[in-house]
Image (spheres, coloured by chain):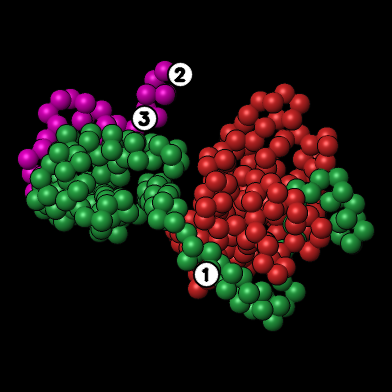
Amino acid sequence: MNMSQKNKINDLDPEFGVDSRYNSAKERDSDAVALMEARLERIRNLSRDEIIRARLMQLKLKMEQYLRNPFYDGRNHFSEFLEAYIDTIYPKRSAFARDIDITPVALSQVINNHRDPKDEFMLKLMVHSEKVFQKVCNFQKRIWYEVYFHDKISHTMSRQEEWGPEIEQHVMVSEPFVEYQTRDPRENDSEIE
Amino acid sequence: MKIVETSTGIKHSVEVLPVESEDFRSIKKERYFFNWKEERLFEIRKLCLAGSNDILGLISFEVIPREWRIHIRLLTVSKENMGKDKRYEKIAGNLLAHVARIAVREYGEMACISLKPKTLIASHYMKKYGMRVTGVTLSLEVPEILELIRTYE
């Protein structure tokens, strides 16, 4: 596309697109330095409220990304996200514990994976986060449960070789259904014909 | 994420997905204005109606972790979505918001997306998306970048 074609299209619609590629590494580096200086100044001037909003949005996007990601990496993401959530909003975790009416010890045990969160804890967390995210972005409060169970399922399935042999010794299928499974399904088709 | 059918005002759900190698068979300069094969070394995303393979818009970008920044290289809507007779609105905004989401997810309050338009359209991007100008580069940072994400949720 030559320049006159491009300008003609821009006259029609400024959103047709942008060619924003740098012409050279030198041009790019020079732009990067000027941009970074200006940005650092702006970052220094961000208010605490703006930083909290950005971090909450980041947390939400990370939780959504985690749920889209099928692999298991051995980490407890629920407690990591919970920790990030609390530390974004509160200078002290005990203040969050007070706000949802649990003891700081119980909160610490959940964060450090020493106990599973009770249903009541999850419900309080959902209500709390719904209030907090209200003015930040569209936040689906059930995502806490989704992350928690995603962790559980991934953890359980990744250890299948450990628990599988022992559990299989205690499981049998006694109903005749098991006999049907061994038959070739095509046999049924030919009978119908 | 939604785009708006211009003639009816009806909103349609869209998906933004990575461009795969077989997509290049249908990505022609006549409909998408640039040679997108040149962008293969960078991240490229396509915007389609949910459940459809027809590409309505494309964006390529470079992630620059040391600067907490994502630089947008090319952005376009398909030919029939350009100008006053366009079929759908908000394609470019959704593509920008998608890249903004990646930037905020990775860099939090340091997040930045940037553009360096070679043409006279800079003022449009400043006005419509709240981009700031530094030298010849337009950038979007906190808090405006959060507003863009919210607008196109």
Q: Taking A53 as reference, is A121 left or right? A: left
Of labels 1 and 2, earlier in sequence is 1
Label 1: which residue? A40
Q: Measure the C-alpha gap from mark 1 to mark 2.
A: 76 Å
Q: Which amino acid does label 1 sit on?
A: Leu
Q: How many labels does the image show?
A: 3
Do discs 1 and 2 share a chain?
yes
Residue that lies at the very extreme toward the bottom in this rendered image = A26
Q: How crowded is mark 1: few (under 14 residues within 10 Å), some or many (20 or more)?
A: few
In the picture of the structure, the residue carrying the numbered disc 3 is A185
Question: Label for residue A193?
Answer: 2
Tell which tag, 2 or 3, sits nearer the viewer.
3
Q: Which residue lies furthest to the top in this view?
A: A192
Ranked by sequence position, the earlier of labels 2 and 3 is 3
Q: Chain in red?
A: B
State which chain disc 1 sits on.
Answer: A
